[in-house]
């Protein structure tokens, strides 16, 4: 078996991408109400700079970053702030949020701005500019992008990696972005590459998207976006999109535990994020919308939609013909790592790559049997952990031992649960173990 | 839709279940079982049924839950145990073997997935110790479909011998220095335990199980290497004193044990490197016992001994976690 073009281990779930991969992105119409939770991602929540009653225009700053790992939020719509108050977050908690009522008479045009002179910016100014644009990783985790672009003293980046693997089943939003806006993706890479001082840009795309590979290769061949761009197809395997695993697939290099791609002189960036960078520096458009794949067997008309941030999930489904009677649940993100929703009034977030309506067959848990130590989870785990043992330790509440078995290295991709013939909720048990370990660590401090 | 169903993901699952894997093993064992009936008549059917009944009865009586016998694992243990028994074994002994296999080999450890030793072999080892004569009385093949007289011995009675008995290929070699033709080993036209005689069918079963990824190919391969290497060297030194490697590989319980017993995932190491050590250990022990020991056969003890070593092997062969190698090296 070749180890080239992929990482070791992993699983092969059915792609389920046929429903949406051929659908061009459409613009979601404006709806009457938008909700923007101030914590869109890991790190510190943003601080609201508007109050109830304020008029805001589309693209206007409404919340500013607090601290370094924090990002700005902009009005997705022209209208009136009706509340800065707790609202339901997709994870189920009530969190501080800004609610905006749409002005039905506004034209909703984004104010055209002059291109930013990014070449004249110092590295610090560039990083702060990205932070002000509210740009975060659009692959799903929504980690604030500017943090990745700030290179600490003594480190350097020689390679920019664009992540177009999109290994989560059902999702095709990155696929469509690469297909429809290859130039924008590479323009973002050019801007980032100049800032980071890299000598090479490598785009990793799973082989099930040959048209995206062709589109980016054609765009790169024009030479408009700098010379050294390598569009590199990688094997179709889950979780190929995890950045450390993409690095292993592309360069056969292993990022040591506790370290970042930057320690191997690399910065990894989602292709959609790269397009957002181009929009910001070329047109002054901050992150106010994103592409969302709406799919799954429980929705009437699957689609790829450009959705303003803060749009209630229920309105997105309405736009797609609504949920079918057999739909029993909705997941935000992909089917492997996504967040199940308990309420359809929660908003689309910066990290919402997909909205999937599932029926009984996806939502029923497989019947659980005893673990017979078949070892399939070990063969699935891309991090070479022992998932069956971790699950067993979690059930026995032997938390300390889980740390010895490297539980904190688990990225929760769920390949173990996917593959387990005994239907054991392995990754779910591991998540419990990780959160206990985190609690104990913070208590110990 | 009134309320949304919320459960933690992932929401996709592979369509392969543990009962499905056991079914795979049953599929693999079916031709072997059919051959046993062909060669040894209804006796094969009766002995396997008695052992299976014993296993299922034990699981029903003492299993953790009332339904645990339905998962098929106890029945599978019974079928495998039955196929390692001689055709003329009194049925009550086969039944007792089944009770012990599940009771002592599995339930006392905490049920499915918890046991250290292969349950079927625990049952067989007990029978071997308790009834050495009955467990080594081999009936010849093709003596008609009617049950052997020994099968019908009343409970707690020893078998009455048919008056006809045969020697297994390994015993023939050990005690008479006679060699069984290779074709007979392949087709199964020899005396022996019910399921062990046909090397050809066992290889077929191995191919199926490896193709289905139900068993780890490394374990049977390592066992074969572990047996063939030392015997091959000894045979090359003195062909008159030592058995030929093909006899060692094709005769006795080696293939049956290598394909169906040693590959039991519960009692073998998980990591690839561990599987090699485990298999080579079994092969080496088999060669040692068969060549130098007082017994003609040693597969059962070899597997049980390596079962005992399995947790230790497991501990020292844990794969290196991602990111714990030399910096930047794959």
Image (cartoon, rainbow, N blue to C red):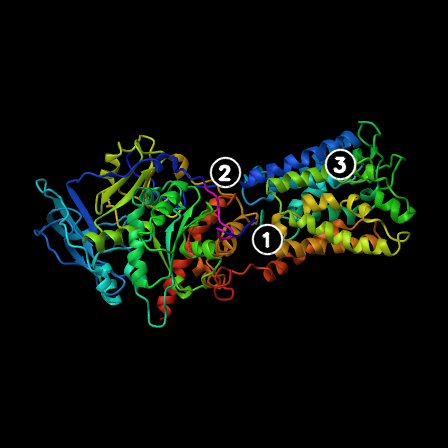
Give yes or no for contact between labels 2 and 1 (Cβ–Cβ under 8 Å).
no
- Disc 2 or disc 3, which is closer to the eye? 2
Which contiguous range is marked in magenta?
A: A5-13
Q: Write down the residue under mark 1.
A: B270
Position of residue A342 in the picture relative to residue A8 (left or right): left
- Above or below residue B30? Residue A373 is below
SS state under label 3: helix
Labels 3 and 1: the sequence-earlier one = 3
Residue B62 in the image, given as x and y percentages of width and height: 60, 44
Q: How crowded is mark 1: few (under 14 residues within 10 Å), some or many (20 or more)?
A: many
Q: In this view, does B138 lie above or below A337?
A: above
**Quadrant of the rendered image containing residue A430:** bottom left
Indicate left or right for B308 with A408 as reference.
right
Q: Are marks 3 and 1 on the same chain?
A: yes
Q: Given the image, what chain letter belongs to the residue carrying mark 2?
A: B
- Image quadrant where residue B178 sits: top right
* Residue placed most toward the observer, A33 or B75: A33
Q: Where is residue A99 in the image (x, y as percent from the top left)?
A: 16, 49
Disc 2 to disc 3, C-alpha distance: 39 Å
Residue B19, position in %: x, y?
56, 39
Picture residue at 33% right of the left edge, 48% below the top: A222
Q: Position of residue B125 (x, y in %)?
A: 74, 49
Labels 2 and 1: the sequence-earlier one? 2
**Where, quadrant-wise, is the C terminus of chain A in this rendering?**
bottom left
In terms of sequence position, does the residue under pointer 2 or pointer 3 come before the other?
Answer: 2
Q: Residue B91 carries which label?
A: 3
For marks 2 and 1, give the CA distance.
Answer: 22 Å
Q: Main secondary structure of the magenta part?
A: loop
Which is nearer the eye, A9 or B285?
A9
Q: Is residue A91 at least partly visible in the picture?
A: no
């Amino acid at each position: 078996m070749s180890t080239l073009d992929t990482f070791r281990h992993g699983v092969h779930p059915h792609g389920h991408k046929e429903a949406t991969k051929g659908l061009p992105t459409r613009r979601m119409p404006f709806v009457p109400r938008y909700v923007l939770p101030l914590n869109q991602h890991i790190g510190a929540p943003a601080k609201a700079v508007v109050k109830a009653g304020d008029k805001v225009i589309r693209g206007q700053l409404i919340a500013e970053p607090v601290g370094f790992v924090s990002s700005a939020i902009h009005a997705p719509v022209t209208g009136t702030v009706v509340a800065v108050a707790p609202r339901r977050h997709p994870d189920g908690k009530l969190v501080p949020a800004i609610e905006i009522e749409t002005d039905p008479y506004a034209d909703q045009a984004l104010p055209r701005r002059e291109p930013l002179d990014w070449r004249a910016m110092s590295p610090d100014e560039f990083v702060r500019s990205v932070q002000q644009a509210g740009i975060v990783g659009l692959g799903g985790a929504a980690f604030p992008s500017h943090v990745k672009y700030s290179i600490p003293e003594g480190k350097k980046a020689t390679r920019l990696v664009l992540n177009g693997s999109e290994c989560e089943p059902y999702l095709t939003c990155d696929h469509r972005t690469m297909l429809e806006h290859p130039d924008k993706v590479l323009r973002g890479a050019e801007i980032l590459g100049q800032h980071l001082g890299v000598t090479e840009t490598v785009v990793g795309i799973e082989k099930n998207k040959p048209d995206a590979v062709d589109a980016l290769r054609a765009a790169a061949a024009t030479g408009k976006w700098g010379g050294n761009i390598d569009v590199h197809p990688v094997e179709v395997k889950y979780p190929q999109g995890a950045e450390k695993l993409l690095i292993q697939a592309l360069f056969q290099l292993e990022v040591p535990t506790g370290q970042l791609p930057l320690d191997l002189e690399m910065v990894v960036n989602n292709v959609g994020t790269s397009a957002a960078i181009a929009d910001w520096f070329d047109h002054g458009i901050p992150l106010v919308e994103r592409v969302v794949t709406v799919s799954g067997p429980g929705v009437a008309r699957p689609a790829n939609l450009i959705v303003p941030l803060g749009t209630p999930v229920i309105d997105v489904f309405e736009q797609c013909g609504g949920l079918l009677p057999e739909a029993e649940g909705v997941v935000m993100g992909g089917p492997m790592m996504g967040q199940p929703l308990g309420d359809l009034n929660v908003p689309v977030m910066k990290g919402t790559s997909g909205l999937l309506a599932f029926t009984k067959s996806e939502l029923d848990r497989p019947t659980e049997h005893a673990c017979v130590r078949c070892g399939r989870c070990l063969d699935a785990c891309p991090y070479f952990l022992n998932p069956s043992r971790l699950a067993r330790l979690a059930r026995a509440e032997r938390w300390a031992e889980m740390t010895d078995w490297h539980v904190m290295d688990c990225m929760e991709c769920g390949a173990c649960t996917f593959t387990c013939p005994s239907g054991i909720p392995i990754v779910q048990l591991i998540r419990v173990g990780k959160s206990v370990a985190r609690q104990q660590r913070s208590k110990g401090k | 839709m009134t309320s949304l169903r919320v459960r933690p993901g992932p929401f996709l699952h592979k369509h392969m279940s543990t009962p499905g894997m056991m079914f795979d093993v049953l599929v693999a064992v079916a031709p072997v079982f059919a051959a046993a009936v062909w060669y040894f008549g209804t006796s094969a059917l009766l002995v396997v049924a008695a052992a299976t009944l014993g296993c299922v009865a034990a699981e029903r009586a003492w299993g953790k839950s009332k339904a645990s016998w339905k998962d098929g694992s106890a029945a599978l243990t019974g079928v495998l145990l039955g196929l390692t028994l001689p055709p003329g074994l009194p049925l009550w002994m086969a039944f007792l073997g089944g009770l012990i296999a599940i009771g002592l080999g599995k339930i006392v450890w905490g049920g499915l997935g918890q046991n250290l030793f292969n349950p079927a072999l625990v049952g067989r080892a007990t029978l071997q110790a308790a009834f050495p004569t009955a467990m080594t009385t081999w009936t010849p093949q093709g003596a008609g479909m009617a049950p052997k007289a020994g099968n019908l011995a009343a409970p707690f009675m020893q078998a009455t011998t048919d008056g006809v008995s045969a020697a297994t290929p390994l015993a023939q070699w050990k005690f008479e220095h006679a060699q069984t033709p290779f074709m007979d080993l392949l087709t199964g036209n020899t005396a022996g335990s019910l399921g062990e005689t046909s090397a050809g069918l066992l290889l077929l079963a191995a191919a199926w199980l490896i193709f289905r990824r139900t068993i780890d190919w490394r374990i049977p391969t390592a066992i074969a290497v572990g047996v063939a290497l030392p015997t091959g060297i000894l045979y090359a030194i003195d062909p008159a004193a030592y058995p030929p490697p093909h006899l060692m590989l094709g005769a006795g319980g080696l293939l049956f044990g290598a394909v169906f017993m040693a590959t039991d995932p519960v009692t073998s190491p998980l990591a690839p490197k561990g599987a090699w050590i485990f298999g080579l250990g079994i092969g080496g022990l088999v060669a040692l016992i068969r060549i130098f020991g007082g017994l003609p056969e040693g597969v059962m003890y070899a597997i049980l001994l390596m079962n005992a070593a399995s947790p230790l092997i497991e501990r020292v062969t844990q794969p290196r976690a991602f990111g714990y190698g030399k910096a930047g090296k794959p």
